[in-house]
Structure formats: structure tokens, C-alpha cells
Amino acid sequence: MKYAFFVGCTVLSRLPGYEKSARKVAEKLGVELVDMPGSSCCGTTYMETLDRKTALALAARNIAIAEEMGLDIVTVCNGCTENLTKTNKALKEDPALRAEVNEILRETGKQFKGTVEVKHYVRMLKEDVGLDKVKAASVKPFKELKVGAHYGCHLLKPSDEMLFEDPNDPKVLDDLIRATGAESVDYPGKTECCAGPVMGIREKVTWNVGMDKVQTVKKYADAMATCCPFCYITYERCQFMTETNPNLPVVHIPQLLGLAMGLTADEVGLSTNKVDASALLAKQEA
Amino acid sequence: MAQSEIRITNEGKEFRNEVMATHGADKLMHCYQCGTCTSDCPVAKRVPEFRPRNIARLAIYGQKDRLLDGDLVWLCAGCYTCYERCPQKVHVSEIVSALRQLALREGKIHPTIKSIVTTIPKHGYISEIGEFENEMRADDGLPPAPTPATEEIKAIVKKTGILGRVGGA
Ligand code: SF4
Ligand code: SF4
């Protein structure tokens, strides 16, 4: 199995632990992730709401790079997944729109052809690698570890575009957490948004939304697991914005998977997590 | 004041039509003000003045200034909860997108968004990933970030004219 690896701005520049663990876990599972030369910001969220054509063209240009590589795209960001998936779908289905976007792209020398698929990393694990294989690779499973999954929005929504799991009852993260031997807990508000995009508008709103969830999860679990850089940053940083830091470890899902697969704390970049997550190591079978 | 007493001016009508002409916002008039969007919105839970149902109502009545002044339309987190749950498929998230585009046209872009959007053609990413960042990446055992072809990105934004409209060109 081989994919074009679209890491995305935020993970590339701010979350080495996520990227490192995603790469190592893929390696463990025999999945080859190939970097995409010349790739850039996908245009999600900010450009997307401001100017659809520019966002489509930015996404299409990145997709065209993967097309030249002859590989489907795997991303580790919900935002990138959403924008690339929506663009891919819109341009495959609407020849007039595709022609318009390709005209915008003309000077770049790249053209959208519609020959590849886009998947989030966790979807790739579930649909292409298979949960059984992930489970079988977990040679150092967790024991008596409770984890609260946070899905975020754009892995699943808009559901008529993403065509993945039910946004009101998603499964993939719970399944992956269970594959590590940990217990995936249910908690109120599990599918609620982190409000990360509001951070740059009214920071306090994001911290309040974040803390509500962190405090809820803390009642039910030892740690929280995410699959999106923005959600991760929100839930980690909000804890430092109050005097009573709840110190709930927040981990990227491949960090959890990697540890269960016998990777070291260093190999999954655990020291880059700002809330100390080393307690997780004590919950593994020897 | 009862909702029915609000009158729409010609100017308001024109504005409403512009909203509805934007991608994904064409079902605005299907809104029957049930309030599902407001009750499920994560931002509305914390920000009293942010009410998706009210945004739909103001758009129906073409209340341009009330919608575009201040940071109202920039407060949406884009979570698509309203998109998923609206019984009428009005998609307030898309109405908000339309309003942002119209705000941009009026020169009312939020400064944070402006700075992000103008960074993309400069650095290829939403923040700079240069030599320093790549050294940090190397320390973490990661390969250098792909060098984004900024010339190509500049060609794209030049063609769509977005930077001129944002005021960053
Ligand atoms: S949920 Fe839909 S119909 Fe109900 S108030 Fe909101 S936009 Fe209008
Ligand atoms: S998309 Fe925006 S308006 Fe709709 S529920 Fe989410 S934050 Fe609220």
C-alpha cells in the first residue's frame, strides 16, 4: 500500500509528534507514505469561505501533484481532508467547474484530471489496512486505560460530501482505540466541535468550548485522543489558559497506536505533547 | 416587534438575492425559523449575539449592516452542525460563507482572516515553513517540509484576484 502523504500546514509546522507517529505507524503496517513535492496549503476553511474558486484551485493543484505521482492521497488533518475531498468530488462531477478551475491553474502547468481518491489517515487504516491488522500489530497493548475519542467535524461533515461514517454516531476512532487494548469511553458531547476556527476571532470562546470538553472527558477517561491538528491544539492549549489546569493528556491517535505497536515514547514524539502524557506508558503490558 | 412587521427595502432585496446567488446559499427562503440550528450550534451556546436562526432571518430581510458590521459572520466555527440538522436544508454554514464573501466585497474582512489569506501566496502555507522550521523538523527526526511552489500559488491568486479584493496585493 502506497499513498501520497499530504501533511498540511499546521501539522508540518507545529505538531511533530503527530507527523512522526503517523509516519512510524504507517511503516509498522507496511504502508508507504510518499511526500508530495511542491505541495502547499490546501486552502481549507479561511480561503474556502472567502473565495470558493481560489480554494478549489489550491486544492486541485495539490490533488494534481498526487495524480502525477499516480497515488491516492492520505491526510492527517480534518480540514485538509474536507477541502480536498469536496474539491475532488466537485471537480470530478462537474466538467464545467473542472474546466474553469483548470483554466485558473493553466500557468502552474498542473491540471486536475480526477484520477485519485482522498482519505484521512484513520479512514485509510480502517478501510484499506483493516482493524484486524491494526489490532494484530498491537503487541504491547494498553491495560486499564480509558480514552475519550474526539472526532472533530470535518472528518465526517458535511456528510453528503464526506460520505464516511454517521456524524452523530461515528466509529472509527473508537475502533482504533479499542485495537490498542484501551477502553474507548462514551461521554456527553462526544461529537461536538472544538471551535478552533474561532480562536483567531474571539480566543476566549475557543478556550471555553475546549475546557468544557476537557472537563467532561476527565470525568470519564485518563486521556483524550484526536485526529485533527486544530482540535488537538484547542484541547491542549485551553488547559493552560485557566489557573486550575486539569492536566488531561491529549494524544494524536497514531501516538496511541504506535505505543501499542511497541514503538518507544521518542518514536511517537510523546515529549512534544504539552500536557505530559507519559502516564500512558505505565498502562502498557510489559 | 413581531417578525412579520419587518419590511424589506429594495436594497435589502438586492442584498438577499446576492446572498442566495452564492454557492450553497440558494435555499435561504426555505427557512421557517424553527431554531434547530441555534439550539445545536457550539458557538451560540457561548456567544449570546451569535444566533444562526437570527442570521438566517436577517439575511431573509436583507439586513446588510446588521449582518456585516462587527465580527458576527466571522464567529462561525464552520462545524456544519446546522448544515446536518436543518430540516429545510437551508445550510446556515453556507449562508455565513456567502456573507463573508459579501463582507469582503464591502472591505469588511476580519484582520485575522486577512493575515492568514495573504500569507498563503507568500509562503505557500498559512505560516512560514523555512530554514528555521526545517531545522526543528530535523531535530524531531522529520524530513524537510515540501518546498511549496509559491510562484504557482501566486499565479493562482493573481488569476482569481483574491488578493486585490482582500487588500493584500
Ligand atoms: S434549522 Fe434551518 S429552518 Fe430551522 S431556523 Fe435554522 S436555518 Fe431555519
Ligand atoms: S457551522 Fe457555524 S453556525 Fe452552523 S452550527 Fe457550526 S458554528 Fe454554528
Image (cartoon, rainbow, N blue to C red):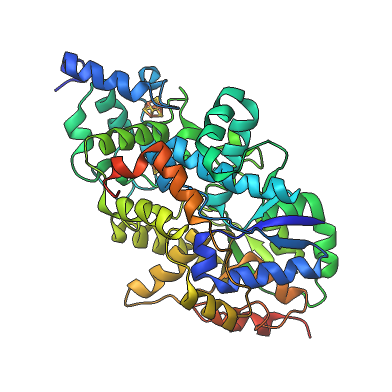
> Who's the residue at 74% across and 74% down the image?
A260
Q: Is residue A142 left or right of residue A60?
A: right
Q: Nearer the viewer, residue A68 or A277?
A: A68
Q: Nearer the viewer, residue A200 or B88?
A: A200
Q: Is residue A141 left or right of residue A64?
A: right
Quarter of the image that includes the N terminus of chain A: bottom right
- Residue A157, image x, y percentages: 55, 41
Q: Nearer the viewer, residue B106 or A224?
A: B106
> Who's the residue at 36% across and 38% down the image?
B161
Question: Is residue B40 visible in the rendered structure shown here?
Answer: no
The quarter of the image that holds ligand 1 is: top left
Compared to A46, does A147 lie above or below? below
> Who's the residue at 70% across and 68% down the image?
A23
- Residue A72, image x, y percentages: 73, 48
Q: Is residue B127 left or right of residue B138?
A: left
Question: Is residue A211 visible in the rendered structure shown here?
Answer: yes
